[in-house]
Amino acid sequence: MQDVVIKRALLSVSEKAGLVELGHALAARHVELVSTGGTAKTLRDAGLQVKDVSELTGFPEMMDGRVKTLHPKVHGGLLAVRDDPEHMAAMKMHDIGAIDLVVVNLYPFAQTVMKGASRDEIIENIDIGGPSMVRSAAKNHAYVTIVTDPADYDNLIAELEESGGKTSYDFRRKCAAKAYSATAAYDSMISQWFAFADQQQLFPDMLAVNGNRVTELRYGENPHQRAALYVPVGPHGSGITQAEQVQGKELSYNNYNDADAALELVSEFRDGPPTVVIVKHANPCGVATGETLIEAYRAALECDSVSAFGGIVAVNRPLDGATAEAITEIFTEVVAAPSADDAAKAVFAKKKNLRLLLTGDLPDPKRGGLEIKPITGGLLVQSRDNGHVADSEFKVVTKRTPSAQELADCRFAWTVAKHVKSNAIVYAKDGATAGIGAGQMNRRDSARIAAIKAQEAAETYGWGEARTVGSAVASDAFFPFADGLLTAAEAGATAVIQPGGSMRDDEVIAAADEAGLAMVFTGMRHFRH
């Protein structure tokens, strides 16, 4: 394919940034500028000579601007195959001039939705002519250059300067690919708005999934796997991908996954006291609240200091220097916080590989949305696990009612268990995890592993007895047998929180009564596979 000389350009953009500079660069190469509405005005105000599309088509813009570029003299000039005699004859017969360059960005649909506009205003911000021109130009990229992103204006100018006013086929092909991605994402946003917002369909017949690539990562879960990070197109809340990385090495695939798990859990406490979460391999290995962040960090670390080595730390309060000093006493991969003071930043600066992420707001744990998991030949889609049970909804099922402290520890353990891979068992005491058992094939083994870790911590710190003594224990799903509950009782737990719902609930309740335990049912399960 040959290079194409740019003689005529059609410009119609909603985002005016960089437009005037581009217009001057094109005019300097004697490119005829054709434009519409506000774009034409911006160019003229900058002293550029511009032809209105209405001059090109012989028809005025009409219907409040809904119809202006939908015309054969526009699309014929875009779609004509320049070396096809029949196409060229049709152009000559109907006085259709070739258009060599199209610069279009689309109506701000996502921004309109995000500002809470009315339905009528949202509908008016569905672009029709723009995507049509983009698709026509992109299809005919053998002859036409299409630019949809203002960030590519400099690339276009450089291409013209290097080739004497021409564009190469390779450049046009790359632009066409990007253009179709832009229209696909745009249509996807509109589709999602109609399905989820306008018609309240949680699971539409066709699920449109899209995202912008932020960066390619060094590798995936393992070095032989390739990976990249994408963020959704359109409205989305705060999260680990929106965090500012202040320092440290490039984040890996596993770093992002673990940091997201830590942020999701610490966000459960965003309105609570100072809280610290330590995560390893997407599972919490220590969680604690305290009067101060450093107090919370120390308590979280004591739960499982072995696993915390090389872990991820997330906090729900601005980081201070003292807490930063404590965190850097052991090797830590990533620290995520809403903000950090100068003292904390100075401490972390001494650890050049440690990644510090500042998230601003913490995500709302009760927010909605969908989670998507690929399986062979398909996608599993579900709503987020944003279920919440108030203390008033807890059902006491044993003879003994939990004390106020036991109930508080039950709530804390239950909140943490939601974020532990199933089968999950969490012991908690005085606002800190005492032992965590995750990802086992049966609940009894999770209870045993958590108790073993608690005993190891007691020996490490010389406590005399494990913190599971006098603790509350949470199970993310019901105890199918009494063995898991009895294992927790042997570890010293005095209160239990679980969903209930087993065929053997009566046996489990009887075992709890015999062991003198207080137990509450939540009626809600929190599996995390």
Image (cartoon, rainbow, N blue to C red):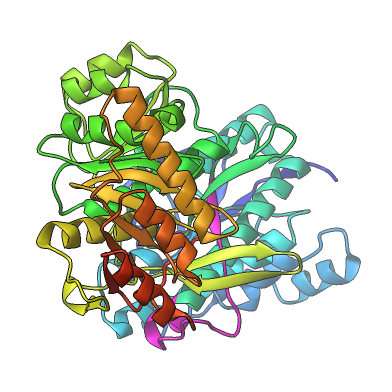
Q: Can residue 96 be seen in this view?
A: no
Q: Where is residue 144 in the image (x, y as percent from the top left)?
A: 70, 54
Find residue 204 and report its image quarter: bottom right
Q: Is residue 420 above or below residue 461?
A: below
x, y percentage for residue 25? 50, 37
Name of the residue lying farthest toward the bottom: 199
Q: Residue at x 24, y 40 (%)?
A: 338
Of residues 4 and 159, the one nearer the viewer is 159
Residue visible at 28% across and 24% down?
Answer: 462
Q: In which quarter of the image is the C terminus?
A: bottom right
The residue closer to the viewer here, 130 or 47, is 130
Does the magenta run of residues contain 15? no
In x, y percent, where is residue 84?
Answer: 88, 64
Q: Is residue 238 left or right of residue 319?
A: right
Of the pair 154 and 235, the residue shown nearer to us: 235
Residue at x 75% of width, y 34% of height? 224
Total marks in image: 0
Vertical order, 279 against 237 (above or below) = above
> Which residue is situated farthest in the front direction here?
514
509, above or below 407, in the image: below
**Left or right of residue 18: residue 401:** left
As for residue 208 lying within the magenta part, the answer is yes
Q: Position of residue 278 (x, y in %)?
A: 36, 37
- Most extreme residue toward the top is 350
| Left or right relative to 122: residue 146 | right
Per the rendered image, the range of residues in magenta is: 193-213
